[in-house]
Image (cartoon, grey):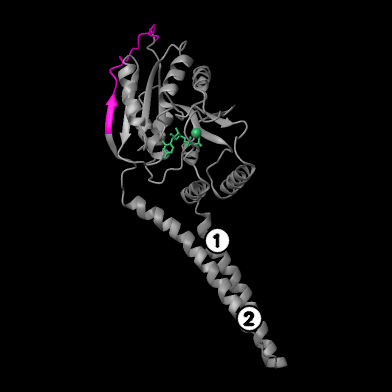
Amino acid sequence: MTSRMKISLVIPCYNEEKNVRIMLETCRQRFENLDTDIEYLFINDGSKDRTFEELKKLIADYASEQIKVINFSRNFGKEAAMYAGLQQASGDYTAIIDADLQQDPKYIVEMFTFLENNPDYDTVACYQSKRRESALIIFFKKIFYWVMNAISETEFVENASDFRMMRKEVVAAILTLKEYHRFSKGLFTWVGFNTYYRPYEVKERQEGATSWSFGKLVSYAIQGFVGFSTAPLKIASLLGSFISIASFLYLIYLVFDRIFFGNDVPGFTTLASLILFSSGIQMVLIGILGEYIGHTFLQVKQRPIYVVKDLLESNGSSTRAHNDKP
Ligand code: UDP
Ligand code: MG
């Protein structure tokens, strides 16, 4: 007799008080015919609303389900929440899914079936078949993927999301990457393994609001560049060499012009703009350097990626009674 498979669901929650219950109920519906154990890992990422209270109620109300609630001491970000969830996941397969129901749990069943039937693949990653975002954001995201793939050795698949299912070997590999600045899009491809990309249709958020602003997206993109490429550091050497050579040639020209033709270059304007131009470039390059030093600084301090305040667990028997329906 083969033992039952187990699927772990990692569900990061930030201000999702109105969604977590519907999320769990939707999952239960979708998984009705699935002959596996399900482990729900809710990570409350320092929500400012009553998400934690709701999650405690879920544990009480669904005593037969295997539910774990990891309550962070503050908001550490979705990346940290996913890391904590993956650390707790004990399933043969682990999936990451948002709490806001934008990602229908029915795809979990499809991803599981796919992995069961295709032993050659280790991960199924969903990408959005069409984005529900403004044209400007879509444009910036396109540019981001283009630049990222141009300067990094890790492949970045356009529109691929964190919505994915992995075998436990992949989870173990991801957990060996202990970097403080986590950029999952890169970490998932960095570990390798065979990934199958499948389209999915993203839905509107059930309740609440997205926590992404344009500024957050920009700093997330910078995380990606700094985390997965050292190319920006080389800009300084390239630009510096170019400017040095060009200005040296210009200098020779000026000296010749002065000696042989007696032309004095009149030029406060020239001088002022040259100085401003070159000091501007230097500032930018120091800024880039600063990003890398900042990353190094925070990594060297070896602070933990998150801090847990409470860890709650339902008594849900590990072999869930199968006829257990509400
Ligand atoms: N999330 C989180 N910590 C945060 C921000 C978001 O755990 O600091 C969770 C959030 O609750 C949701 C998922 O990450 O389950 C995706 O967030 P959101 O819906 O805001 O992003 P979007 O779907 O707009 O990309
Ligand atoms: Mg969302």
**Of tags 1 and 2, which is closer to the observer?**
2
* Amino acid at dot 2: Thr
Q: Residue furthest right?
A: 261
- Residue 256 to residue 128: above or below: below
**Magenta residue span:** 310-326
Image quadrant in which the N terminus is located = top left
- Residue 202 to residue 252: above or below: above
Q: Is residue 299 left or right of residue 195?
A: left
- Residue sitting at x 31%, y 33%: 71
- Is 2 part of what is drawn in magenta? no
Element type where label 1 sits in the image? helix
Rendered location of residue 290, percent (x, y): 44, 60
Image quadrant in which the C terminus is located = top left
Rendered location of residue 220, percent (x, y): 48, 46
- Residue sitting at x 37%, y 28%: 42
Label 1 belongs to which residue?
Answer: 235
Mark sitting on residue 38: none
* Amino acid at dot 1: Ile
Is residue 71 something one can see in this rendering?
yes
- Residue 289 to residue 199: above or below: below
Which of marks 2 and 1 precedes in the sequence? 1
Rendered location of residue 245, percent (x, y): 61, 73
- Residue 4 to residue 264: above or below: above
